[in-house]
Image (cartoon, helix red, strand yellow):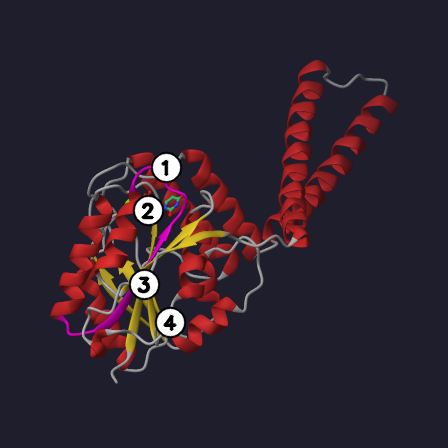
Amino acid sequence: MSALVSVVAPIYNEGPGVDRFVRRLGQVLGEAGLRYELVLVDDGSGDDSWDRIVQHALADDRVCGIQLSRNFGKEPAVLAGLEHAAGDAVVVIDSDLQHPPSAIPAMVQRWRDGAHVVEAVKRNRTGQGVIGRLGGKLFNRAFTGLTKVDLVNATDFRLLSRPALDALLRLPEHSSFFRGTSSWIGFRRASIEVDIDHREGGASRWTFRSLFRLAVNGLTSFTSAPLHLVTLGGLAFAAFAVVLGAQTLIRWLRGGSVAGFPTVILLLLVMGTFLLLGLGVIGEYLARIHEEVRARPRYLVQEKSARAVAEVPEQLVPERK
Ligand code: UDP
Ligand code: MG
């Protein structure tokens, strides 16, 4: 039997977008003649997304739905999908059609040619404001520089082979960062270029806050460089203190007075900021440790879609684990 390709998509309040997505994927994968299953993870949507998923699962045996018990966020939702995927290769894709499904056959081809991780690299980034784009770029550059995991132009649109997926699922971290971890595991890689489309319907689910959290989580789970930066900053301040202290002492011994107020205020401001920032950085790591130590499950499943009644011809029914 030919290889099974699992397509995993997180869904959060996509409404009619769900139908659009399932239809589009069925079309593309059907045309490519791939044997596939569709794992749709409802990340605690407040709208009718789950009902739609259930309908699709009932109508088509290749579609399976998982409903998380609340909104856990995209990363845990993807993880849930990955853990439930049965395929020999797994493709992770956004359900808002920003990642073109038409690229999947090419990714599968790369996998057949021997790659274990196939990344879709974006040629462009549309549908984002200037600030968002700039922020994204800055973060990706900083991340790449600090962690040596290349994120520039990276997307979450990826194919993993079964061995690569099993390796990824062995990582025990609580707050996973798919884009980072799927690079960290290594394995033979390939990439294809895609155009990231505008969102079809609805607005981006990311708020500035959630993006900031993602960035901080990504950084803290991949590198302790910020902690070392604090140490470096402290050392720089120590050197500065020696110079300034010596200067002050000498002036005092000579009977002159040091220029007063502005110096004190500036020192206070700079020191205060640095101290608080340093504490904040340490706090972030502490929070991560706290999170990991609690070891709560990363997501909870509330419901799984019923399997379709066997109307589908036998050879189309995917084998399950
Ligand atoms: N998503 C999710 N849970 C969330 C936020 C988003 O499952 O809490 C899903 C969403 O349905 C979409 C994908 O993650 O399929 C990407 O979300 P979005 O388009 O809002 O992000 P962007 O494309 O702007 O990065
Ligand atoms: Mg999107």
Q: Measure the C-alpha gap from mark 2 to mark 3.
A: 15 Å
* Residue at (66% x, 32% y) in the render: 276
How far apart, in angstroms, are the residues tagged by discs 4 and 3?
15 Å
Q: Give the residue at mark 1.
A: 46
Mark with earlier residue (4, 1): 1
Q: Mark 4 points at which residue?
A: 86
Q: Which mark is residue 307?
A: 3
Q: How crowded is mark 4: few (under 14 residues within 10 Å), some or many (20 or more)?
A: many
**Nearer the observer, 111 or 69:** 69
Dot placed on the residue nearer the N-terminal end, 4 or 3: 4
Q: Name the residue under label 2.
A: 50
The residue under the point 79% across, 31% down is 245
- The secondary structure type at the circle numbered 4 is loop
Characterize the local packing of mark 3: few (<14), some (14-19) or many (20 or more) Cα atoms within 10 angstroms.
some
Rendered image quadrant of residue 101: bottom left
Mark 4 or mark 2, which has the lower sequence index?
2
Most distant residue in the left direction: 31
* Quadrant in the picture for residue 123: bottom left
The span picked out in magenta is 32-48
Residue located farthest toward the bottom when viewing the structure as drawn: 1
In the displayed orientation, state which residue is furthest to the top: 261
Amino acid beneath label 1: Gly
